[in-house]
Every structure is written in C-alpha cells, then in structure tokens.
Amino acid sequence: MNIIKNIRSSHSMLVASALLVVLALGACTEEDEINVGPPTIERVRNTDPTTADSAFTSATLGSTIAILGNNLLGTQQVYLNDYPLGVNTAYVTNNTVIVTVGDSVPTVATDPNVPNTLRLVNKSGEAIIEFQTLPPAPQVTQVKNQYVQAGDELTLFGRYFYFVDTVYFPGEDVYVTSGIETNSAGSTLKVTVPDNLDFSEGQSIRVVSKSGGSAVNRNTQIFAQEGMVADFDTNGALEWPWNWGWGISGDMIQPSQPGISSLDGSFAGMNQAFPANWGWNNDKVINLANWGGVQIFPEGEGYEPSTPATNFDIRFEVAINTTESIAGLEMQIWYPDSNGNELSYNIPLSEVIKATDGSWHTLSANMTRLTNGSTRLNTYGDFLKGDGFTKQLRLVVINTTSNDIQAVVGVDNIRVIRAVN
C-alpha cells in the first residue's frame, strides 16, 4: 500500500509541476505581449562583461555585439547596412539582443555608399541608429621579400588592408604613416622601409588600421642581419670563390642574370630548361658544404644547441624570370643527418612566387619540416652535427611536370633564422 501511495503522490507532484510550467509559460507569453512596444536602442557594446558601461559606434566583421535598449522582446530581425544578421531568440531579452556580425555584411571598405546604420525590427515597430561596420583587423600572410633595408620598398600580402594608417617596423618608435599604398581588394600593401631599424626590439612589422592591428608571427618578420650561411659574396667557411665552392659552378654566381637584378652583391643564378619528370643536372643544384668539416651553420647566442628545432626556419630569397607557368616547379631543401638519414622538404614555387617578373620573394621552411618518414630534427644541436663530419645543406630545383620549363632562377641569402624565442 505504501508503494502505491508513494507512486500516486509522485504522480500528483509531476502533474502539479507540469501545470506550473505551463502557467508560467503562459504568464510569460502574456507579459511579453503586454510589455512589447516599439523598440528603442540605447547603445551597443561587446559581450565582454568588463565592458558593461561602454558604448560602440562601430564593429568589425566576425565580432559579436550586444544591443541594449527597451522593448526588444520579440525582435524579428537586426540589419547592419540593410543586411540581415539573423536573430536567435535564446539571445533576446526585453533589454538586450546579442547578434554576430557575419562576414557578408557590406562595409565602407567595399561599398562607400553603405548607409552605416543598425536597424532592429519587432512587430511593434523598428529602431535605427548610426553604426559603422568595418572590416576585421589587417592580416599579414606573407612578406614578399624579407631581405630589405632602409629605403627599399616592402610589399606585404594578406587580407583587410583597408583604412591602414600606420605600419610599424622593428625598433622603438620606428613607423610609417604616409606613402602607404594598398590595392582595392585589400590584399597587398606597399611601403618604403624607414631608417633606424632596431632588431633588438624584434623582427616583425605590424599593420594598424581603424579596425586594429595585425598579429605578429613568423609570417611578419623581416631580415634581422643574422644567421647567414651563404650570401654568395663573402669568403667564409664555404671558402668561396672557387669552382663548386658554393656547390655550383663559379660562372653561375653573378650580380645579375637575364631579367633578374641583384638584391645586394652577387647571387646564384640558374638559366636553363629545367628537365621534366624530376630530371637531373648539376647546374640546378646549390650544395652548401665545407668538405673539410668546418662548421658552416650559425652558432652562439640565439643558436644554443639545446633549443628545439621547431624554433628555427631555413630561409632564402628566390627570383624567377619566365613567361612559362611555374606550376610543378618545386624547391627542395635537403639535409643529411648524423644517423645517415636524408631529410628533405619541397616547397611548391607557385605557392610563394606571386610574379615571375624577376622580383625577389622569400621562401621559408621550419626546420622540422625536413623529414624522412617519421624522422626529423629535434634540437638545433642535431642540425649542427651535419652528417657527423661534413655540414651540408642543399637546394635543388625540381620539375615535376612532363615538359621542360625554361626559366631563369636566382637564389640568394641562404640563412638559418631563430624565428621563435
């Protein structure tokens, strides 16, 4: 009997609870109907609780904003520049509507005639305020040529180069605010490198616009005058000049090649029909080595042997002059380790080289990209060992297509950079 009574009691409690929920929902709906009048917007802020007292007059694509006001229950739609954002009722109260600014919203960067308004609509009316939608902060995806000096033109590739007002360079108060050129798509930026660069303050450039500043990473660095292995000008551990001192014949090292001008002094040039189907010839190879066992790689401060190999990049500049497609051309970085493994990594040139007009581009590969199966370098000390005696690094132009590709290729300033501290 007690069991039956307990069941009946539980059943009665469930029915009562359900009834209360229904009544509560009905009460809320009825209250909403009573309270909802024409909406008003007081201000807009972001969703960070620490900015509760702030008010925004603009927002960038991809951001989430909170619209504050009155009579916002029942909001049917929010428009930015007459573009609907979509409203999730779970993020609507009588005083707040939270929405995300999608990437498809028109901005003044792509359409100067946008109304610059935010409009909120419910069944009782609408509210509208002036509000500007901006592109996101600039993003730098590639420094075309990292080997630049004061007075040189620096070209950046990326996204959202709109309303750029400042480009910062390494050094304290080293920046440019005039002469900044960007294209209509916001994907390229050109600026003249200023004087007084100071790499003790870092290696990166930073682009700042009305929407914010670009992030600093490996992709935003310029040459900090360190880590050089081969510049094809100075004598050093590679004992140049002499035939094959740089791994290529001496007449390939010139201050110019057809259609390619020097960055600084001489460079290694290859002028040939690069053989199809991974074909081989010696003059498409740069083999850096000192066969006497002398260390050719950088050592000392910043190049401690215990540093993880992932902190280092192998970088160099490449220029290509050709009227043919370079799709299928690759630059292989090859290195023999102390355990007899041949480690390598291939860079498709068409992914980095934006123009085959003889202009210079920086190629970069993290040291751990050089692999043989699952084998890779773990520390910088592993790289310093070489094959146990000879320290060697090789660059090879590879043609993976079924047709020869005629081109002039220049290579300069092969270096090892500590890209992460």
Image (spheres, helix red, strand yellow):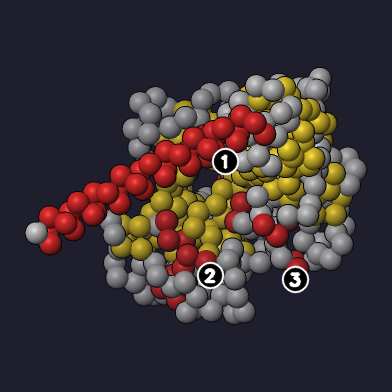
Q: Residue at point 85% right, 54% down?
A: 175
Is residue 3 or residue 209 the one in the foreground? Answer: 3
Q: In the structure shown, which secondary structural element does the residue marked by tag 1 occupy?
A: helix
Density class for disc 2 (Cα within 10 Å; few <14, some 14-19, many ≥20) is: many
Kindly report the distance in space between the C-alpha atoms of the residues bearing marks 3 and 2: 22 Å
Q: Describe residue 237's horizontal placement relative to residue 191 as left or right.
A: left
Q: Residue at point 66% right, 67% down?
A: 226
Q: Amino acid at mark 3?
A: Ser
Q: Amino acid at mark 1?
A: Tyr
Query: Mark 2 = which residue?
Result: 297
Density class for disc 1 (Cα within 10 Å; few <14, some 14-19, many ≥20) is: few
Which residue ends up furthest to the right in the rendered image? 178
Density class for disc 3 (Cα within 10 Å; few <14, some 14-19, many ≥20) is: few
Query: Mark 1 = which residue?
Result: 91
Decide if residue 190 is in sight here: no
The percent coordinates of residue 263 (x first, y second) are 72, 48
- Image: 335 above or below 92: below
Query: Mark 3 = which residue?
Result: 200
- Residues tagged 3 and 2 counted as in contact (Cβ below 8 A): no
- Image: 406 above or below 14: above
